[in-house]
Image (tube, grey):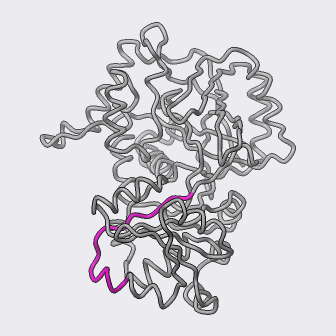
Amino acid sequence: MAEIIPFCGLRYNRKKVKNINKIFAPPYDIISAKQQGELYRQHPLNIIRLILGKQSRNDDRRNNRYTRAGNLFKEWIKTGILVKDAVPSIYIYTQDYTFEGIAKKRIGFLARMKFEKGKGCLPHEYTLAKPKQDRVKLIRAVQANLSPIFSFYIDKKNEIEKILKPYTREKPLISFKDKEKITHRFWQVEDKKTIQKIRRLMKRKQAFIADGHHRYEVSRSFFQEMSGKKGGKGEFNSVMMYFTGFNEQNLSVMPTHRLVKEIPDIENKINSLGKYFKISEAMNLKEMLSLQAEKNGFSLGMCYKNKFYVLEMKDGCLLERLMRKLPAQWRKLDVAMLNKVVFEHIFKLNEKQKEEKVSYTRDPLFAAERIKKKKISVAFFPNAAKAEQVKKIALSGNRMPQKSTYFYPKPATGLVINKF
């Protein structure tokens, strides 16, 4: 079901790039303006200049963050800063990390996956229009996948991991520890027999998108766009993906919190929450998160006017009535309740308004700070979905609200690039 293709990856030239550990970056959509500046200062060749270039007041159709990325990308290739591997390969990638106090090790591999008719790689979230408009401009400018789509597959016997693990005993091509104390290691596999074994096993497996829904949809649209121009031939008929097995070590899910800007009649709307929820005040952010985690069933944390609360749904029958039109697979998710009951029913926000008024963060401290500085009106803190729930929703053909999940940790950007 997943046709995996090795590729000649474009990688940083170790002979020309000093302090190579400083050229990597997280995926573009979790990089704040502050972090963008830090990455720019960290290294003159940091991948941030391609995936999330700075904007200027003088930007126009001919000179903007996308055209600059395209020109810089060509320059780095021409001058040998980026060099293409000679042999089609797959790339093993491991991350050692700590999640909720438990040390874990994720193992996976990077390869191209061919776009097929039908479902392809199964999504679990809806996407937003603006990020897709942004990414389509970039992919047209650079003609490459700069970052891998993060995906998982079901492999109950761990057959693929058993093939990958012996290679991880060798010295990695790249090894570094990032600011979150995640250790990243990277290897190249050129052996045709090994690659063929993995390809045969993956053909029987369904791939699921964990992170990168916007980039996946844009890559697929770009393939359709280019098919009309080049007769469907070319490496744009596939997308670079990071594949990892579905298990507790590999898939850790964090919640994504909602930050709401000023909306009309916000005071009355906040007060009306009491009709639907039992509201308990907490002393601080830490206590709110702790109390919320202890609750059974639906519970939301909330920060409003620098005070913290835990919201529990009062009436199960009312909840069922309000959510009756939603897919059964995600009626039990906190983000579904927040989206349907709070944002749509109480706040009266339509899809366009939600995209304009709601932003996202995984950092509860950042959310509380935005409230304190009066940059937003209210913040909501849902519990995280479980990986098993995500898988079932994807298999059912349904999707969760935008930004419902935050799979942790994210694959780093800059390890390898897929140039079309």
Vertical comparison of 91 with 66: above or below:
above
**Residue 201 placement: quadrant:** top right
Q: Looking at the image, which is closer to me, 31 or 130? A: 31
Image coords of residue 61 (percent x, y):
18, 43
Viewer can see residue 145: no
The residue lying at 67 percent from left, 78 percent from top is 328
In the displayed image of the protein, which residue is found farthest to the top?
15
Image position of 272 (left or right of 211): left
The residue lying at 36 percent from left, 45 percent from top is 32
Vertical comparison of 111 with 288: above or below:
above
The residue lying at 50 percent from left, 23 percent from top is 10
Image coords of residue 58 (percent x, y):
12, 40
Vertical comparison of 417 with 347: above or below:
above
Image coords of residue 230 (percent x, y):
44, 39
**Residue 65 placement: quadrant:** top left
In the displayed image of the protein, which residue is found farthest to the left?
58
Vertical comparison of 374 with 201: above or below:
below
Residue 266 in magenta stretch: yes
Viewer can see residue 169: yes
Image coords of residue 382 (percent x, y):
54, 66
Q: Looking at the image, which is closer to me, 65 or 369? A: 369
**Residue 16 placement: quadrant:** top left
In the displayed image of the protein, which residue is found farthest to the front?
283
Q: Looking at the image, which is closer to me, 303 or 99? A: 303
Q: Specify start and end residues of the magenta stretch as a single range.
A: 255-269
Report the number of discs: 0
Residue 326 in magenta stretch: no
The residue lying at 58 percent from left, 88 percent from top is 314
